[in-house]
Image (cartoon, rainbow, N blue to C red):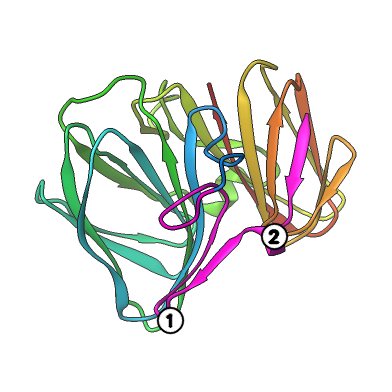
Amino acid sequence: MIDIRPFAGLAHRDHGWLDTRYHFSFSDYHDPQRMGWGRIRVWNDDTIAPQTGFPPHSHSDMEIITFVRKGAISHKDSMGNEGRTAAGDVQVMSAGRGVAHAEYNLEDEDTTLFQIWIMPDSAGGEPDWGMREFPHGDRAGRWEVLASGDPEGDSALPIRADAKILAATVKAGETVTYEAAPWRHQYLVAVGGRIRINGAEANPRDGIAITGEEALIVEAIEDCELVMVDAR
């Protein structure tokens, strides 16, 4: 099953400093048909204005992944961590039994990012945070695992969930294939260009909910970057 959810039809909120689209129910948006996809609970498409951001607030029992598309996000938390995650890179926060954090765009341009929440395999535990640079060239024409509950080598950031976050950059006319377990849930978004997935066409920033497929063949109609979560 491949369910394409057009970007224009996603819930939209414009707070001035934050322009966001919700792929799933979040904040004051509630749709009982879009409460998540497998273990994926949140996928927000955020544009954050310069010199603004999310003031300190708390989370618990959630894996929070931030994929920065343009600009950078600066992080500070109650564990004493501070860091700046730039375009193409990823930060992960395991909220565990509880953590407070703030996320600000301290740049002179808009920052755009995907904020993805995944439910952990078990509750509690010490909170943790990490970020890593992922050069675009390393995922040209192939899938790269950015974060995983079963980290692959030294490159993937660890999360506490049976899930993977992957990315690929694909040039127009080229394809990438992903071997999928049909009982799992994939959620895919293309940035920058149109794609065709197993024959179904999708526009940039459409949400694509997938399950029951053994292989995903993604053809780039235009140059694009793909971001996907594969979760139980």
The amino acid type found where label 1 is placed reads Gly
Q: Nearer the viewer, residue 141 or 17?
A: 17
Mark earlier in primary sequence (2, 1): 2
* Residue 165 horizontal/vertical position (percent): 51, 36
Which numbered dot is residue 134? none
Q: Which residue occupies 45% across, 24% down?
A: 152
Query: Which SS class for mark 1?
Result: loop
* Residue 157 horizontal/vertical position (percent): 37, 35
Q: Which residue has dot 1 on it?
A: 16
Residue 55: image quadrant is bottom left
The amino acid type found where label 2 is placed reads Gly
Residue 34: image quadrant is top right
Q: Which residue occupies 51% across, 50% down?
A: 30
User: Magenta span has 196?
Assistant: no
Query: Which SS class for mark 2?
Result: helix
Q: Is residue 116 found left or right of 78 in the rendered image?
A: right
* Residue 162 horizontal/vertical position (percent): 45, 21
Q: Which residue occupies 15% across, 51% down?
A: 81
Q: Which residue has dot 2 on it?
A: 9
User: Magenta span has 25?
Assistant: yes
Q: Is residue 100 above or below residue 160?
A: below
Q: Which residue occupies 34% across, 64% down?
A: 73
Mark 1 closeness class: few <14, some 14–19, many ≥20 residues within 10 Å: few
State which region is magenta.
Answer: 1-30
